Amino acid sequence: MNVLLIGATGATGQEILALLLGADHKVTALVRNPEKVGMKNVRLDIVKAEIEDQETIVKMVEGKDAVLVAFGPRSLEKSDAQETLMRNLVAGMKKHGVKRIINLSAWGAGSTARYSNPIFKLARWTILRNVFDDKERGQKILTESGLDYVNVCPGRLLNKPVRQGVRASVDGKGLKATMTRADLAQWMVDQLTSDTWIGKDPIIGY
């Protein structure tokens, strides 16, 4: 597949990028700082752009089979970064007829808020309030877009090796609220070719 990856320099994005290249996908990584990608491959194109740069984002969507978003905020301050990114991505996908998008969200955002544990709920409405408000505005654009989206909602992420055994559900019942980034990355990449969770906000864990 020909994939546009957003967020390739982050901890989860790096895991995703390695998996995509390891599976022989062609990847265009749209990043703010190309020096932080840390990988070189004949199937990897690195494009520098800011999330506000709608012209570049729309252009980079052209010719892609799917978009994979692992973008995350770098500050807890009030922001519209995720909302802006999603608006520009959706515009590009509609213009160029690209339907599949896999987006990294979080357990406790949007429709999964009702299934969040008390600790997650407290964090969402205190220290992470600005982050989640922005995330939910972006998700609203995504869910109303008519695209074939999967809005992936993991719990707290750990920098540990692959464990496997990832499960998904709409309500998170029986799932642990932590998982490794490596397993999250693999699950997200798997959604490029699976229709099971299209148009849904799966909560994933073990």
Image (cartoon, grey):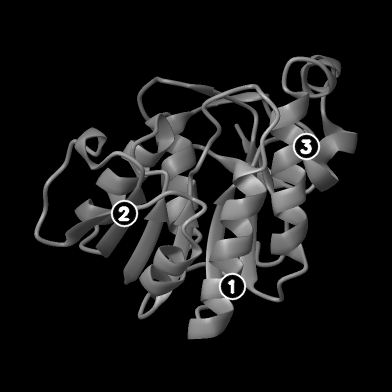
Camera-side residue of 141 and 194: 141
The local secondary structure at tag 1 comes to: helix
Quarter of the image with the N terminus is bottom left
Image height of 138 relative to 149, above or below: above
Camera-side residue of 114 and 84: 84
- Mark 1 — residue? 91
Rendering coords of residue 139 (x, y %): 72, 53
Marking on residue 133: 3
Left-right relation of 70 to 120? left
Separation of disc 2 and disc 1 at Cα? Answer: 18 Å
Q: Amino acid at mark 3?
A: Asp
Rendering coords of residue 10 (x, y %): 39, 33
Left-right relation of 38 to 159? left
Rendering coords of residue 102 (x, y %): 54, 58
Tag in front: 2 or 1: 1
- Mark 2 — residue? 29
Separation of disc 3 and disc 2 at Cα? Answer: 26 Å
Left-right relation of 86 to 127? left
Separation of disc 1 and disc 3 at Cα? Answer: 21 Å
Tag 1 near tag 3, CB within 8 Å: no
Any part of residue 9 in sight:
yes
Q: Please tell me in which quadrant of the rendered image residue 143 appears.
A: bottom right
Q: Amino acid at mark 1?
A: Ala
Rendering coords of residue 119 (x, y %): 80, 14
Left-right relation of 189 to 38? right
The local secondary structure at tag 3 comes to: helix
Camera-side residue of 99 and 198: 99
Any part of residue 196 in sight:
no
Residue at point 70% right, 29% down?
78
